[in-house]
Image: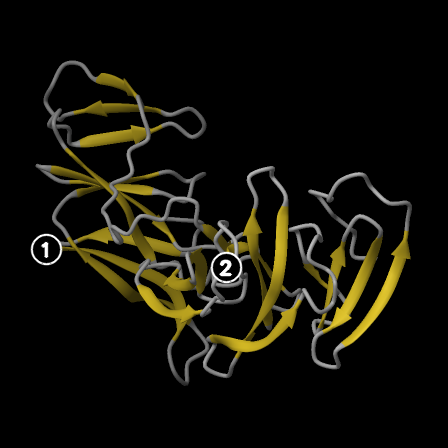
Amino acid sequence: MFRNKVLVVRSSEHILFFKLAKEDDEDIEKWLQYDSMASRGFINGSKKLNRFTIIEDNHIHFCQFSMTDDQTDSDTFKPIRVNTMMNFFETSMLVLGDKAPYAIAYKEDEPDFKMFTRKMHQDFKATVNNKNFENALGMTIEDVNHFFVADDEKIFMFDDITYEKLYEIDLDLKESDTREDIEIINMKASNDGQFVGVSVGKNRINGEEIITEVIILKRNSANQFKEFKRIDMVKLKLTKICKRIYFDFDDSEAMIFADSSEIIQFNFVKKRKNQLFDFKNFDEQPEFFIFNPD
């Protein structure tokens, strides 16, 4: 029994999960089966923790119920198999500690029991992409089901669960007229997640960045980003801005830049430039620029 809402039962071939629910046209709650797992193992769980184990002859499965902190989908209580290990000590029961990473394992008809402590955290990993992403940039957006990886002239979008490549955007960067290559310097998403700004320029040997343009990507109805606008920073005379760029919190169609003399707001739709603050010149190009939402 888990939180007096879920009942876990072992049958001859399956682990069955029941929860209290009302059938159609009935007001009385009944224990109704909502899920199952193919296993003949023993079940052991904790009343305090959201986890349980299924112990078989050769394997031990560590499971938990799908829940969130705000309990928005707590009614589902879907069982999830988190990890599996070999039952190398041939135990038939495993008691997990509520706070410390300790476990007591014992087997029926044996005079004593064994106590174990976790030596390391094991996550099974498999290669999903063998491309060399050295010096690449990454970014996530909360309400989008994929993450961004900027490498060379392209931005790759990967699924945040399967890590499969969904699509890519070729920025078609201009050729450099100097020995420094034109590359992606930084990326930033707007507060509402509708736009992504990609600053493009040169990384000079002395550590100075020259921003030649900012490419704006816009999210469409299919939840994919496409190129929307290009801001020519050379024409705006803003090539030596801080590489950290921002979108205006109140207006996602405007970006905020900072250089050695001023802070500027630029609306890339209306193509309107506005000085927000004028200060005494810095001796060097600013490396960091942060402002609060207010």
Identify the residue at horizontal 74%, vertical 47% (top origin).
289
Amino acid beneath label 2: Ser
The answer to whether the residues at label 1 and label 2 have Cβ atoms under 8 Å apart is no
Q: Where is residue 237 shown, x and y percent of the image? A: 74, 63
Category of crowding for the residue at label 1, using alpha-carbon neighbours closer than 10 angstroms: few (below 14), some (14–19), many (at least 20): few
- Of 46 and 145, nearer the camera is 145
Identify the residue at horizontal 26%, vertical 17% (top origin).
115
Q: How many discs mark residues in the rendered view?
A: 2
Q: Where is residue 112 shown, x and y percent of the image? A: 18, 14
The C terminus, quarter of image: bottom right
Local secondary structure at mark 2: loop
Category of crowding for the residue at label 2, using alpha-carbon neighbours closer than 10 angstroms: few (below 14), some (14–19), many (at least 20): few
Marks 1/2: CA–CA distance: 67 Å
Tag 1 residue: 13
In the image, taking residue 284 as reference, residue 29 lies left or right, namely: left
Amino acid beneath label 1: Glu
Tell me if residue 115 comes above or below residue 126 in the rendering: above
Identify the residue at horizontal 48%, vertical 66% (top origin).
173
Q: Quadrant of residue 234?
A: bottom right
Q: Where is residue 258 shown, x and y percent of the image? A: 77, 54
In the image, taking residue 251 as reference, residue 59 lies left or right, namely: left
Identify the residue at horizontal 77%, vertical 52% (top origin).
259
Q: Quadrant of residue 169?
A: bottom left
Depth-wise, is mark 1 or mark 2 nearer the camera? 2
In the image, taking residue 211 as reference, residue 151 lies left or right, namely: left
Local secondary structure at mark 1: loop
Tag 2 residue: 176
Snapshot colouring = secondary structure
In the image, taking residue 28 as reference, residue 207 lies left or right, namely: right
- Of 160 and 75, nearer the camera is 160
Q: Where is residue 37 shown, x and y percent of the image? A: 20, 56
Tell me if residue 155 comes above or below residue 98 in the rendering: below
